Image (spheres, rainbow, N blue to C red):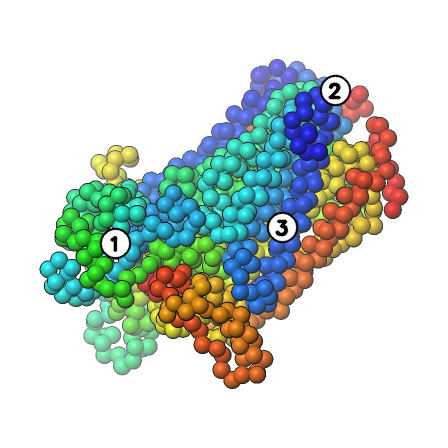
Amino acid sequence: MAGQFQKHKLGAAGIGGMLGLSMCITLFFPSFDFRSGESTWVGLDKTLSNGRVIGFSYEDPLVRGEGKPTTVVLNKDPKTGEAIDPPIRAYVYDAKAPLSAGVRHPSNMGPTVGKLSIEKGKIDQANDSDPVVFTIEATDVDGEEWHYVNNATVNNGWTAEAVLNTAGAESQYLIGRGKTVYITEGCWWCHTLLPEHTQDWQVFGTPPFLGDFNGEMPTAFGSDRKAPDLLHVAARNSSKEWMTMHFFNPRLVQPNSIMPRFDYLWGKTDANGKAIDFSKWRAEYNDYVSGKTVHPPEVPEYAPESEARALIDWVLMSLR
Amino acid sequence: MLLKLLFAKEEDIPPGSATIFFGYSAIFWFVVGTGLGSFNAAKLAFPDFVTGTEMFAFGHMRQVHVLAVILGWISMAFAMTMMYMTPALGNTKLWSEKLGLWNCFLWNIGLSLGLFLLWIGITSGREYSDLIWPIDLVVLVAVLLPLGINVWMTIAHRRTQGIYITNWFFGACTFMVMVTFVVGQAPELFNLTGLTEGYLTFWFAHNVLGLWITPVAAAIAYYTIPKLTGNPLYSHRIGHLHFWAIIAFYSTPASHHLLSAPLPEWLKSFASVEGVLILIPAVAFVANILLTMKGRWSMFVENIEIKFSVTGVLLAIPLNMQGGFQQTRAINWYVHGTGWIVAHAHLALLGMSTALEIAAVYFGLQQMLRRKLYSLALANFHYWFYIVGFCIYWISMTIAGLIQGAGKVYEVPYIDVVVAEHPYMIARWVGGTMVFTGNLVWLYNMWMTAREGTVLPKGRYSHELAYER
Amino acid sequence: MGWKFDKPLHEMASEEESTAMLRQWESEKHGGLWEGNNRLPLPFTYLIALIVLTAFMITMPIWGQRPNAEHYAPMVNEMDSAAVQNLATDEEKMKYLTAFAMKELATASDPRGPGLLERHPITWDDLQNIAPGIREAQTSQKYPLAFYNIVGDKIALANFEGNRTVNGDFFGEPTNAPARVQPWFDKGMIIDLFYVSYFFIVLILITKRLPSFTRKPDMSKTS
């Protein structure tokens, strides 16, 4: 039995026991807590507007923002034509967009919200291959207000086509695709989506609450902040013009900014289908910077199918 | 040369081949990683440096820098040291040189592919788990598993009864990094979402440091310091304290990264306590190594490997003092998310861990090539550019972090913080570029060692021979 | 394995085992390396004790905390009283209410209240915004008030403490009843105490099974 203490079997069992206990406390125990978190309106809005997965997935292998739902703002019922006041958000999944993580696994949205979404919202009748429209509805359970996901195609008879037509192009927002741009362009290496509980809320707004993320993937909290927190940026600044200039060249509106230029998100053509001459723009901008001209060159209007549009949609609609 | 060896018979492969290929790959990725770091730092200091193209945007390059350093330099240097230390400590030879070579080959291919995909924006969008899940599977099957099998089998086939502490660490950490990796990538593989995803991301990000990068680097010091000084390791008992404390306390504090997220309060507090307790393995490690140096402190000046090793051990002291306390709520509110943390991360990876690995790569390559280092002058140049560059980086980012913290607390408009940080961003770029320059010199030095270094006589170690340059 | 427990902090392995371990230790070299059998110097042992103590002290839920609904409830209860309504400015109202709440909380079992209110002042407007939420929580009595987080002018249930159970069934469908509420000073501290004790017991068993540090392996015998 000499040297028993050094034998590798005993040691391996010890390593397993120690690591097992550690994982039991840090993974198994919290899983019960995570499981009981109920989704808020913010959480439902995120899971419905983002689609299944942001980032690499089957439906979007090149991470170009394909297979994502379209979020629309409705001010009248597409079926009856009745006015809806205040306007509500509807989430249109075409045949190519797989259902969001929350709808796919209702327990992700929390035990009660998941149950309500199945019983009242009939989300179990939706499937990946058919177009479907979702809304977020409120209901009263034991005197408390709960939000759940409503399958509007089944419950309200809204077809995807009718909803898109009723809303019109100006009320359609590519939120899921916009968040994809946020992820692929690495915005989250400098901006966080997690105001801190101690100080930040006075400047950057409230930290997220429990239930604000259910069904979101990835959460992209970010950890290395070199720029302002963005979780509520649209509540501080909702100007589309400012966003457009700032994304094209941040130093047009904020001379001391160290943010990269995201002019390449405009693609090849502007809103009128005219080719954008980037080298000319940069030359004119350099003249402006060196003081040769008084005004900076005009920022081209982005095309509706450009990545810039999706990103601005996401910023203005989702980060409030 | 590599291709020929890949398909050679096991007995025809010269011992040490896997070490040599891993060693040069590691140095190559170190040059790439620090070069990218220098480039990124330049972009933070001068935002219009290389602009107008998607390919060289900061958001496309940052994660390539991080993963090239972690998976390329640090992990490959670990593999390199495992390839020669594990058999040496068991008085045996490597279980399979061929597996080691294939591991190195597939590692380089997989990593290049993964980094290329990240570069063009194909990412999972999860911090430190940025690689998409097919690449994750490649990392698991072609990188971590063969490495683990080679290490475990070598330990199992040892010709000693006991197992030296370095091999305990190698065997345990190759296993634990696999567990950590699988759990960390689970959200992508099984479509876990929300807070679970956020928590597992940081569970991985913390534990890959705690169960892989820090302990393996420490294990390397347990070999290089006694080997080069000729002293016995000060204490087997303290080794036990270090080893078990690493597993118990370094595997638990993940949620201290998310103190502001709505994670269970008990989990955050639990993590904070454990986070302070990582000082226990740190105390054990530093005490054990520095007491081993007894009577041999002159080597800290004279011997290049000891110079790097002891630098790494000394850097472990501020590293753990920062790491232990900055994560408690009492301090975290001030420094969270600021450049302070960036400085701390570089203290861990570029400071403590890298210094210990550089020493082991210097030493191992000389033994396996059977050649003396080409030039001491170049090695010293490497050391001083590395340490001065690192210190500039560390100090400037720490100051920048404190400025950011003050800006946060006193609600200074963010843009004023950016302006105030600008000089430190330039300093960071200068520091990073110095490290990069030192690494280029190192690569040249090791290249010349392979070609022109004095051949070691049989049975002699490199540090027993005098330098010629 | 032979155990002996007469001097547990000295050596737990039997005499033959200890000797055999030392002999083995002396007879093999790991790639030219060997290990000493020295103890951790005593100052470092004290340092480790200090670290454990510090770890618990510095993570007590005192620092980095924010007041919750429980701390603002006295203000909300008092805000409509005549004494407050007669005050002219919002500042005066808040000054009065803060002092009032601090007095109320001074006798509570959780002593952190007054300090938290002092460090996190709230405006009259924000108080009015959170008041309906706090009143609702008070009437519904569903969760303890301390479960409601307050940030700025928002109130939300953001607490995970205590798993939720159905009829005591830990694995059943969760309901809204928390199974267990921890006292204010125990946020994961008890489980930590258990974990740390477990670690040190295992560690003592491991190291005291080794030959005592007073026996040094004789390295001259190494071949």
Q: Are marks 3 and 1 on the same chain?
A: no
* Residue that badge 3 annotates: B33
**Chain for numbered disc 2:** C
B44 over B242 or under it: above or below:
below
Q: Nearer the viewer, mark 1 or mark 2?
A: 1
Task: Tell me if residue C176 can be seen.
Answer: no
Marks 3/1: CA distance? 43 Å
What label sits on residue C27 in the rendered view? 2
Residue at figure coordinates x 52%, y 25% from the top left: A13
Label 2 crowd bin: few (<14), some (14–19), many (20+), radius 10 Å? some
Q: Which residue is mark 1?
A: A92
Number of residues whose C-alpha sits closer than 10 Å to that of mark 3, classed few (under 14), some (14–19) or many (20 or more): many
Closer to viewer: mark 3 or mark 1: 1
Q: Is residue A308 visible?
A: yes
- What's the residue at 51%, 47% (across, down)? B117
What residue lies at 48% left-to-right and 75% top-to-bottom? A252
